[in-house]
Image (cartoon, rainbow, N blue to C red):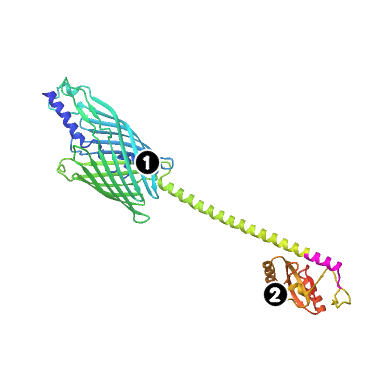
Amino acid sequence: MKKLILILLICLIGQLATAQQVPFYSQYFFNPFIYNPSFTGKSGETRAFLTHRNQWTGFQGAPVTTMFTIDGPLDGEKWGLGANMYNDRTDILNRSGARLSGSYMVKIKEEHEIRFGLGLGILNNTIDYSSAIVEDGSDPNLFGTNQSRTDIDADFGISYFWKGLNVGFSIPQLLDNEIEYSKVDGDQSVVYDVRRHYIANVGYDYEIDDQWAVHGIALGRFMSAAPSQFDIGALASYEKLGWAGFMYRHEYAVAFLAGGKINEKLYLGLSYDFIINDMAGYAGASSEILVGYVFGNSAKEKEEEAREKEEMKQEMDSLKNALKENIDQTEKNTNAIDSLGNEIQNVRNDVDEAVEQMKSAPPSSGGGGAVVVPIPLNNDEDNDLSDDYLDNKGEALPNGFYIVVGSYSEQKWARRAKLKFINAGFPETDVLYNITNKFYNVFLSFTKDESEARQNLKNARSEYPDAWLRVIR
């Protein structure tokens, strides 16, 4: 009879435990990796959390749970790697486990991403007979060797992120194992079902301004042969330094949460459940403490580094653009100088050629109706026929004396030179076109008087030594 009572006790505990095989936690907002492996490394930081929860302290043998987790990003936050270890003790049942988890992020489009997570580890279940409370303490089965079984454990998770929204779904105890314990003196064996659970979560972060933010959270737990349960709550945070909020736990309790940063590396969080169901008068308190630590640079420090890098990049881009503009302008100036040098050389060549022509074929001094130009030829003068030249209107130029200061193969350069000399104080400057050699000559003044022309040439050469006198007859 005592053996039967013992077996029934074990079975009863096993059935009760199925409703909470996956431990309850209140502060999963700060560490969602605790329920869903797809959140592994999502924070962008390498973080470690230690969570300890006492539940229903008014009951002897009530659940006491301790979990340690550590996770962080890999390969620019595309991959995540983490591990957790936990112990969950409820009356004569003691469950402990360890698991490695990994996650992988898929970018759908801008600001949309999906993460997949998988965890694999071991789960140990122990029946501790010495913790059983019975009337007959002399039954030898109560003080026999504790029964312990170890099996493989796994979980799977998927989550979606868009701006401040995250939606997740996970399956803890994915393998749905059955753990069979040894028979007691040939009686019926005890089987402990490690039931598959289903957990869905939704969260949304809304930044009110640069200092304040509100965080909405909801989570539902589902399992066959047990009532469904869900949480819904909200928290407010100030400059990511401190937070406070509440959570309604369906048909069970209202939880209050608060915490903050001790420094840039260390977190501390507390929660307390006020039971609101029929157990309120005798179940006692349920409380939870969370301690977190960030390894390496915190998210805030990384944001500062990223901002500084972006500012430095923008400054470098600005300097590159300015340098490119300077190089382009220098190239333009070089081209202009080269072009001007070519024009000067062309003018010199024209002058030399004209002088040589005048030396080799001077005008006749009389007879045959030839016109005599009473000006001696030298290197400073160029003689030509009036019908070889046109003015700006395309008409032949009048005979006379022209003080020329430039000769150009292209009209645009002649026009620019004209403007330059006008601005320099020679308002009569104009352009004549030689239809024979197709060059444009820029002259400062025109006169039909030879003496005046000689004086004008002398005055022009005081500022422009290369000026010469062109005589058109």
User: Can you say which quadrant of the picture contains the C terminus?
Assistant: bottom right
Tell me the distance, in whole angstroms, between the alpha carbons under discs 1 and 2: 90 Å
Q: Residue furthest bottom?
A: 449
Q: Residues within 10 Å of mark 2 (few under 14, many from 20)?
A: few
Measured as percent of width and height from the top left, residue 245 is found at 27, 49
Res. 102 image quadrant:
top left
Helix, strand or loop under label 1: strand
- Answer yes or no: is residue 360 visible: yes
Q: Residue furthest front?
A: 368
Number of the label disc, if any, that sits on residue 425: none
Helix, strand or loop under label 2: loop
Residue at 38 percent across and 50 percent down: it is 111
> The disc labelled 2 sits on which kind of residue?
Gly
Residue 467 left/right relative to 32: right
Measured as percent of width and height from the top left, residue 88 is found at 26, 34
> The disc labelled 1 sits on which kind of residue?
Tyr
The residue pinned by badge 2 equals 394
> Which of the pair 342/194 is nearer the observer?
342
Residue 408 left/right relative to 352: left
Q: Is residue 250 magenta?
A: no
Measured as percent of width and height from the top left, residue 235 is found at 29, 50
Number of the label disc, if any, that sits on residue 293: 1
Res. 340 image quadrant:
bottom right
Residue 185 to residue 171: above or below: above
> Which of the pair 22/46 is nearer the observer?
22
Main SS, magenta residues: helix
Mark closest to the chain's N terminus, 1 or 2 = 1
What stretch of residues is rendered in magenta?
350-363
